[in-house]
Every structure is written in C-alpha cells, then in structure tokens.
Image (tube, grey):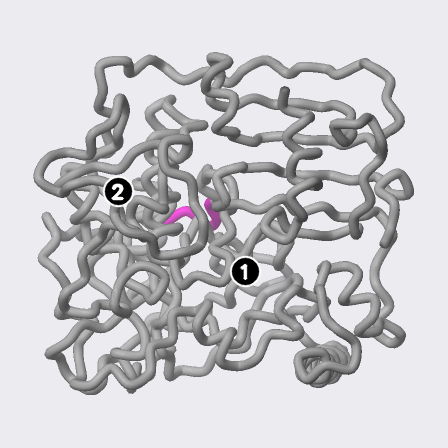
Amino acid sequence: MVRLSEFAIAASVFFDGSESIRLKSKIGTRNLNTYSFDEFVQEFRRTLEVGSQEHQLRTTTFQESLVQIRAHNSNEFRSWSAGINKFMDWTAEERRALNGYKPNRGQRSSLAALQTSTGEATFSNSTLLDSFQAESPPVRNQGNCGSCWAMSAVEAVEAQLMQKSQGGRRLSAQALVDCVPNPQHCGGSGGCDGATGELAYKFMTDYGIPMQQDLAYDAHTDACPVNLDAPWPTSQRVRLSGWNHIQPNNKAAPLMQSLVQNGPTVVAVDANNWFDYDSGIFDGCGRDATLGHAVLAVGYGKESGKDYWTIQNSWSSGWGESGHIRLLKHEDEDNFCGQDKNPLDGEGCDGGPAEVRVCGTCGILYDPIVPVGATIEGSDVVPFSPAPVIQQTETRAAPIFDVSEFSVKEQKDEGRDSAQLSGILSTPAGTETTVAPSFEMSELSGDEQKAMKTLFR
C-alpha cells in the first residue's frame, strides 16, 4: 500500500455514487515498458488471492491489454494514444455489459421504433461556428452498470439548468435506473441492462425525477421506491415538457448547430474500441457501428488539421481526457456511413428491421436528442448558489487533500446541498489512512469511507 502523504492528490467528489472519487498521484507518466500487474493491482485496488483462478484470469487479461496498448503506441503516426486504465483486467463480456451490449434478444428491432417524441428540431447549414465547446456538468461514473442511457440523459438536463442559472444541481440518475419502464426492450430490458434517452425523457416528462441527494446512485437496478400514479413525490423534482430528435439525422451540421443552440446533446455511439483511449483524436471506428452506448456530445473543434467531436463519457473523470474523448470528425462526415447490423444489441426496440444506416465516426450522427423545457418544480424552489469555500486549518497527522465540487447527502441537514472544500483528512481516531494512489469510492473499505466523510463534518 502507498501512504497518501507521499503524493499530491486531487479529488473530485460527488458522493451520489454517479461520480466516484478518483485520486491521481503526481508520480509522472507511467512507463509502459516496465508497468506490471502488481502495479496495476496496487493502483486500482484489486483484491485478488495470488494463485487463484481469478488471479490468473485477471493477470492474463491484463497482459493481453498491455500488449495491445504497447502495440498501438508504437505507431509514431497515430492520432491518439492508449494508456493504462481500469478496464485492463476486464473480460470482453464485462466490457460489453458496460457498453450496453445485449445479445440474444429474440426478434429483431429498429432504433427508429422508439416512443414518440414531442417533436423534431430541424437545422440548416447556415452560420456554423468553426469550433464550439458547451458548458457541461461534471463527469459521472456508471460503474459496472449499463446505465449510460440514464447518465447522459440527466447530464443533458443538468446542462440546460446551467443555462438557466440553476446549475450545480445534481439530478438522480438512479430514479431512471429503478423506475423507467421498458416493455419494448429498447436498448435492453431496463435499468442496468439498458434503455434509451427517449425512455428517460418520456419518464421525466410524465413524472419528473428527484435530486440526487434524495435518491443516490448505487450502480444497481433496485425496486422503484415510489408509485407511478402521479408526479414524483418530493419537495423538488425536475420535469421536462418533452424532447427533440435532431433532424435531419445522419448529418453533421444539425448536430453542430444543436450543440451551439441547445447545449450538450445526447448521442448513441459504438464505444467497443474506446476502453484503452487516453488522449488525442480517436479514429478507431469503422463505417459499420453497433450503437450500444449513450454519451453526451459537448462540442467540436480542430487540432493539427484534424476536426473532432468532443464527447463526455460516463466512465469517471480518471478515464481518457478527464472523462472525455475526442472523436475524429471526417471532412465528409455525412458520407462516412455503414450499417448497424445488430440494432437489438444496442439501443434498438422489439419489432423493427434487421439493419439501419448509421453515419459519422462511431455512428454519432444517427440519433441525437435533446431535452426540452427543463423546469424545477417544488414549493421551496430557490436560486441555487454554491456554498463558499471553507478552509480547514486545523493541524492533524493526516494527508492533505484538494477536494472540490462534491455533493454530499449528509450536508442537507446543515443547510447545504453542495459545497467546495479544501482541507485535511484524517480517520476518526486522528490517524493517517493508507490507500493506493488511485482508487474509486466504491472500492474503499467501510473505515476508509468513514474517513472520507470525516472531512465533510
């Protein structure tokens, strides 16, 4: 184990489970030529019995991933770099589950056979900006639950609240995971097995969802905690008036204009080759794509003569470029097209055609959608203002943390739903805790989680 005092640590904390704590040590760039499985186990806090079948499986899977990463980075003409990541010991099946891959669905379906939206937003090719970056909420972490559809849906709504000077509010993705019905198996069978942004927005239009402090994310599909015969019963909820499909689809210009005019836009993509991405402009998708992952498009731009889309993922801020990936935007993106030959493996519904035409890198242009009319309902709705920064100056025998942008349920009783802190962390006994330089909140022991909470009291 590595003592925290040996590192300068930055942590971004959202204690709703949707964004895990990610601690990055300032130890410099890892050496891919010498990086070992023992280092990986320590860095990502794996608990494995040496010599066990599980240990052997994870070691072999890690080694295969490391060979692939090294081989990719040996190409001096590459446009993106691969790097060490938490998925290196995940099996192919575990990775597919994270991306919402849905095998053996029975009858074929169509991504077009989704619930009817409230409208279509049509854009022309006029007045396109050369580059644009929308303001977006913090990156979330879906864990090992196929809830990308819920994560991206709530992030787009949070972004619209930010445009209305109501930013900083965290919405409950868990409410969607637990409660959204999915009788047509659109994108999966519901919850952690998958659904779609359209289903999420239909639910938010009909019932609304609470704030994250009222129903925290736990990366599991639980029983819906409320009866769905009226708007969500809570002091505050967010509802929509509907959602729009950006038209015409399979065209780059409408998505670009949606980003400028609407802000972050939900898109479906094929992310099966994204896991090893670390930085740069990703060009690892072919023309055919299985749209099995929902993400948030947040901008576009150009670097070294290459155009790109900026995508906010839901695999934690420790993945990629601070939780983001830049996808190659071809000069003729509209004609970079292929087929989704397995719609039911992604976000398709029961009852449609066997194949659909998809365009853009990783199929990004097929079905962009945006929420409409985000409104906070409740008798105690007040303008949101972050709590002031609080400096913890007491000297303790403990490591120093930089902690920012977290939302903690326990603070509701203190009159603050969120705050920004910079302080010193110790265990309840005042001693220093010992952890690896990189870990996730869900992987902490009970005592370590209590130590983290000590900072917030």
Q: Are marks 1 and 2 in contact (CB under 8 Å)?
A: no
Residue position marked by numbered label 1 in the rendering: 326
Displayed quadrant of residue 331: bottom left
Distance between the alpha carbons at the discs numbered 1 and 2: 38 Å
Q: Residue at x 67, y 14 (%)?
A: 390
Say the numbered circle drawn on residue 421. Answer: none
Residue 182 percent coordinates (x, y)? 18, 62
Secondary structure at badge 1 equals strand
Secondary structure at badge 2 equals loop
Residue position marked by numbered label 2 in the rendering: 225
Q: Residue at x 37, y 79 (%)?
A: 289
Q: Is residue 264 left or right of residue 304?
A: left
Nearest the eye: 112 or 79: 112
Instruction: Answer with mark 1 or mark 2, whichever residue precedes in sequence.
Output: 2
Residue 149 percent coordinates (x, y)? 34, 57
Residue 214 covered by magenta stretch: no
Q: Which residues are magenta?
A: 128-132
